[in-house]
Amino acid sequence: MSKTIEIRWHGRGGQGAITAAKIVANTAFQSGYDGIIMAPSFGTERRGAPISTSLKISGSEINDLMPIERPDIVVVLDHVLLEEDNVTAGLKPGGLLVLNTPKKIDDYHLPEFKLAVVDITAISSEAGLKKGVVNSGIIGALAKASRLFDMDLLLENIEKEFQGRKPGENALSAKLAFERTEIEEDK
Amino acid sequence: MKIIESGNVAAANGVKLARAQVIAAYPITPQTPLTEKLSEMVESGDMKAEYIAVESEHSALSVCIGSASAGARAFTATSANGLLYMSEQVHWAAGARLPLVMCVVNRGTGAPWTIWNDHQDSMSQRDAGWIQIYVNNHQQIIDTVIKAYKLAETVSIPVMVCFDGYYLSHTYMPFDIPEQKLIDEFLPSYHFKHTLTPESPENLNTVTMPHGRNDAEGAWRDGYMDIRHSHYQEMRQALRTFQEVDSDYSRLVGRGGDPLMATYKCDDAEYIVVVMGSLSNRMKDIADELRDSGTKVGVLSLHVYRPFPDEAIREVLESARGVIVFEKSISYGAQGQVFNDIRAALYSGKKRPFIHNYIIGLGGRLIKNDDLIIAIKNSKSKGEELDNEPQWIGLNR
């Protein structure tokens, strides 16, 4: 069995974390990962309430459908969730934490993890998206910080997913996020 | 074409490929996205079918019964209390021998209210006279929905395709959507031999005498019990029919081969775990882990639960030292339903392994790998000492 990469996404109901995870899942699958499981938090989803989604990626079939308990990467679509919810629960020491935040790396003190920050909320307005559309942008930040995915393929899949809903602007938001993501030194 | 989508979307694609002509359903969590997807497909013209919005599950199945009686290929889906609400019609559809297909997206039953997974809902309809098939992943969902129509139309018995709420319904994984032209070849349009039309009206399933009688034309009509006996016999024969349906499907589509049950490393297993649904996948990892530490474990994942493939089950389990049944339902005042059925199947065998029953995951209670491993080790060490009383795993007290 090959190693499974476990990425847990945190957002609010309505922010599109599941859509973002789905785009990354498709990209990974097209890149040759045969084992893909994407499991949203089970239960009722309410607009604005914290939600999470588990994305597992592996070279071979994955049998465990349960939510991720020990993520390699945590992606957070709204930095306020850091205070509201235990988003880093189980994150492996040295694990990557990708944050949409207006703050800088130095504003945080999370010595156990490797932090990547970018202000997607600002970037998406700049890209021509409605305020609060952050799920396309965060994909660019994840790609930059994790180096796991091919950016061109991601952009292609973003345009496909957002067909009829500003595909160019969503791709631009991801592209700008990719360029502007700040990553903490390797730990 | 391979896509990554949810189990509900896999089911909807199966219904579309089967060219169902009438869909009547009432939304209920976790089935809702399945019916939403179908209504989208009908609305966009992707699928040529009548989508009939109804006010309840009882009406949903009633509409399917009416449609199927008029010769249409019909579909519905539900979960939990929705299934319970249509229960009267569930029995009726089976007694009327209508070739319907229904997805049951498994969820615990209320009260108390739960939206999470277990198998109590479909288990409560076990004896309604429907064929029940439990599947483990999205590929099996889409393939089984298609095969279910072929089976239902061949044996004139409705089929429930049961899959785990959330674990499968809302989880995304890759699966292949077979080509429409292959499915058209596998499942051509069918003619229901008792089709009702305005030109030839008939009374069907009216009051039936206990002992049979001649009808108005002087033809002999079976009594109630004879009709029940035919249903029973043809249900048993459906085991073989489903194997034939599966081999036709795998010849055309290139997938299949384990229609009644899937076994994993059972040949040399000392202990065989029996399980239904998505947990079967994880059990394979657990079997591997236990094998690494020297305990030979196999997994029997039961797909067809009614009709019950007792002979085939006995053949696999007989050689084991112990059989360990994990199940997500309970017959109150007795044991787990699957456990009791398996135990009965083993009774007439040449060898009788010990058999233990563990109840797990009711109402979505988290099923931990460690708990499963402890249970299997517990069975191994206790063996014959442990009685038939089901062991409840993961309780707070």
Image (tube, coloured by chain):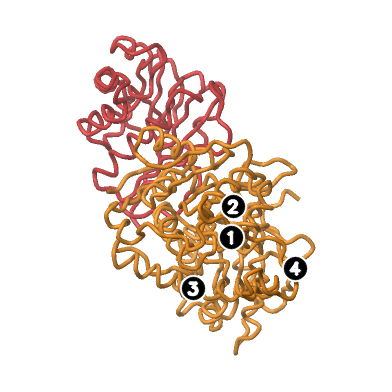
Chain colours: A red, B orange
Question: Extreme bottom residue here?
Answer: B350
Residue at 43% x, 45% y is: B12
Nearest the eye: B291 or B234: B234
> In the rendered structure, which disc, 2 or 1, sits on the residue that comes first in sequence?
2
> In the rendered structure, which disc, 1 or 4, sits on the residue that comes first in sequence?
1
Q: Is residue B325 above or below residue A102?
A: below
> In the rendered structure, which disc, 3 or 4, sits on the residue that comes first in sequence?
3
- Kindly report which numbered mark, 3 or 1, lies closer to the viewer in this rendering: 1
The residue singled out by tag 1 in the image is: B372
Q: Is residue A22 above or below residue B136?
A: above
Question: Extreme left residue here?
Answer: A152
Q: Tag on residue B315? A: none
Nearest the eye: B310 or A74: B310
Q: Are marks 3 and 1 in contact (CB under 8 Å)?
A: no
CA gap, disc 2 and disc 1: 8 Å
The residue singled out by tag 2 in the image is: B367
The residue singled out by tag 4 in the image is: B389
CA gap, disc 3 and disc 2: 23 Å
Q: Are marks 2 and 1 in contact (CB under 8 Å)?
A: yes
CA gap, disc 3 and disc 4: 28 Å
Q: Tag on residue B294? A: 3
> In the rendered structure, which disc, 3 or 1, sits on the residue that comes first in sequence?
3
Q: In the image, are marks 3 and 1 on the same chain?
A: yes
Pointer 2 chain? B
Residue at 53% x, 38% y is: B32
Question: Extreme front residue here?
Answer: B217
Identify which amino acid the numbered label 1 is placed on: Leu
